[in-house]
Image (cartoon, rainbow, N blue to C red):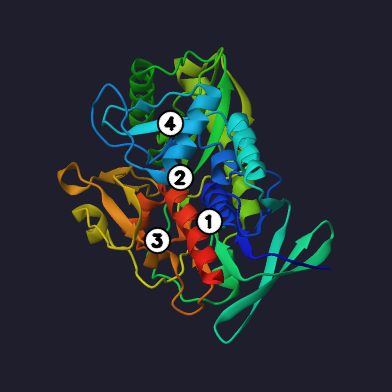
Amino acid sequence: MNISTEILIVGAGMAGVAAAIGAARAGRKVLLIENHLFPGGAATGAEVGTICGLFQNGKTENSAFLVDGFAKEFAEKLMHRFQLRSEQNHMGLHYLPYKVDELKLFLEEELASNGVLCMFDTEFLKVKHVDGILQSALVFCNNQEVEIDFQALVDCSGKAVVASKLNHPMVETAYFQATSISFYVVDSLMDGTELMNFKLIRALKLAQSSGVIDDGNIQLFVIPGSYIDGKIGFKLTLPWEFNPAKDSIELHTQKAKDYVTNYFQTLQENIAIFQESKLESIADDLGWRTANRPVGKYILTEEDVVSGRKFTDACAKSAWPIEEWIPNQAVQLQFIQGGDYYEIPEACLQSPIYDNFFFAGRIISATDRAIASARVMGTCLQTGFSSGILASKFYD
């Protein structure tokens, strides 16, 4: 079976949805393919629960948008649609909590209203190219192989699936950040307030000091805004490294689910907050934070981020700190100097080898430390939308 489109987007996470809408608004015929049965990527499959990177930092009463353009429009529409409000933590980092089912619905509505054709439950197999131009992709959908002809392609897969099939040069990576997994509990004493968060932290540290919980098992956090009628969500950072491009996602996901089940039993037996509670559900997907990234025409660096560097071809801006989750260690944050923000250039989204190949989201061309800031959803919305526009311009 053969079909054709003008712009092919691989991956329907936040970056992929934004890329598809960007290309569609530029007047192009767009096909978005995704291996899940629904859009949202980690935002929905891993039940992350918060959109970070939209707002300025600071301990202020109200959140002020840092992003503009499509990312701001997206956030404002989502907030209005479901009456959502931004929140902030004790460090002055602002974020937008959401409910997974509502976000799924919203993404489906946005894709439909912008005329984006979608193929879900679709596996990307390979891509053909001639003289530095990508020409077609082979995918597996509905128990058959489908060949898709296109004019330009955007990889928003989160794990550089297209770049990997092309043997595209990758940014040198020294390590991969720890993954997390979300789960929901009912009938605990947790109510989602900051006070209960501090009580949870103290209880975990006490359990750690007494040897009940290992050092790598205290990275447990409440998902902001998740508390409803006695049910609350948690995110547990797992004490091992995971490379989504190399390791089996299925095996690691099952390992993580088994780990949560055993971990929760330990909580029930040793921490009063959880003694009467029940484990209701575990997210379907792992929340892996970093993967391999293709080399672009420019590689964003730690110095670019920390110094608040600006670019003439900027396509995104972010004030989110470098946020590193290393197995068996507490999260490490490094903020942008002077409370400033940095920009990401279009060159980080463009392949230096294939003229019609672009990438966005968690796989932009960036070093390990730089992507530790640029991987958050608010930034992914911006790089995604820009990649769709870039792909549309190539078609001209």
CB atoms at circles 4 and 2 under 8 Å apart? no
Could you give the CA–CA distance between mark 1 and mark 3, rounded to whole angstroms?
A: 16 Å
Could you give the CA–CA distance between mark 4 and mark 2, rounded to whole angstroms?
A: 16 Å
Tell me where residue 173 appears, x and y as whole percent: 39, 66
Question: Considering the numbered disc 3 on the image, is that residue within a helix, a strand or a loop?
Answer: loop
Q: Earlier in the sequence, mark 3 or mark 4?
A: 4
Name the image quarter holding residue 219: top left
Question: Considering the numbered disc 2 on the image, is that residue within a helix, a strand or a loop?
Answer: helix
The residue singled out by tag 1 in the image is: 158
Tell which of 238 and 48 is nearer to you.
48
Amino acid on which disc 1 is placed: Gly
Q: Earlier in the sequence, mark 1 or mark 3?
A: 1
Left or right: residue 201 compared with residue 41: left
Could you give the CA–CA distance between mark 3 and mark 2, rounded to whole angstroms?
A: 32 Å
Q: Earlier in the sequence, mark 3 or mark 2?
A: 2
Tell which of 382 and 165 is nearer to you.
382
Answer few, some or many: residues within 10 Å of disc 3's Cα (few below 14, many 20 plus, some between 14 and 19): some
Check residue 110 in the rendering and tell me which mark sits there, or answer none: none
The residue singled out by tag 4 in the image is: 96
The residue singled out by tag 2 in the image is: 70
Question: Considering the numbered disc 4 on the image, is that residue within a helix, a strand or a loop?
Answer: strand
Amino acid on which disc 3 is placed: Tyr
Q: Furthest residue to the bottom?
A: 131
Tell which of 341 and 122 is nearer to you.
341
Question: Considering the numbered disc 1 on the image, is that residue within a helix, a strand or a loop?
Answer: loop
Eye-nearest disc, 4 or 2: 2
* Number of dots carrying numbers: 4
Q: Earlier in the sequence, mark 4 or mark 2?
A: 2
Amino acid on which disc 2 is placed: Phe
The residue singled out by tag 3 in the image is: 175
